[in-house]
Amino acid sequence: MSLIAVEAAITIADPSTRQALIDSTAPVQKATRDDEPGCIVYCFAADPCQDDLIQVYELWESQEALAAHLVHPNYLTMREMLGAGGLTGAVSRKHRIDASAPVYNADHVPSASFD
């Protein structure tokens, strides 16, 4: 079984409202993490380099867990909240992950290898 990562970039019309929008979604982010089986990471955060951008990172234990999320009230609520926040664009992608390994080895040296 493969992990599933979701990454998205959401742009909003008024950058001055970005942080309030993210803050308003925090309870839904927490509920998703706490209440949805298979959710490992669910984070919507301000991009530090582009003031109208919200970065999304999700990690799910399986395709089935993501499928259940996509019909869960938390997902539907998040879509509604973000849609009301003045979105001007959104791009999202899902990725199947077939291997995982630490970035740093026992000697604290970073490696791109999966050995």
Image: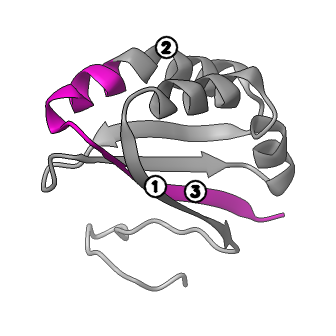
**Which residue is pictured at 55% across the width and 19% down the height?**
28
Specify which label sits upstream in the sequence, 2 or 3.
Answer: 3
The residue where tag 3 is placed is 6
Give the label on residue 82, or none: none
Front disc: 1 or 2: 1
Query: At which x and y percent is residue 87?
Result: 39, 42
The answer to whether residue 9 is seen in the rendering is: no
Give the label on residue 27, or none: 2
Type of amino acid at the residue the image marks with label 2:
Pro
Specify which label sits upstream in the sequence, 3 or 1.
Answer: 3
User: Is residue 22 highlighted in magenta?
Assistant: yes
Query: What's the distance in space between the residues labelled 3 and 1, CA to CA?
Result: 13 Å
Q: How many marks?
A: 3
**Left or right placement of residue 79 versus residue 47 in this view:** right
The residue where tag 1 is placed is 90
**Contact, mark 2 vs mark 3 (Cβ under 8 Å):** no
- Front one among 42 and 76: 76
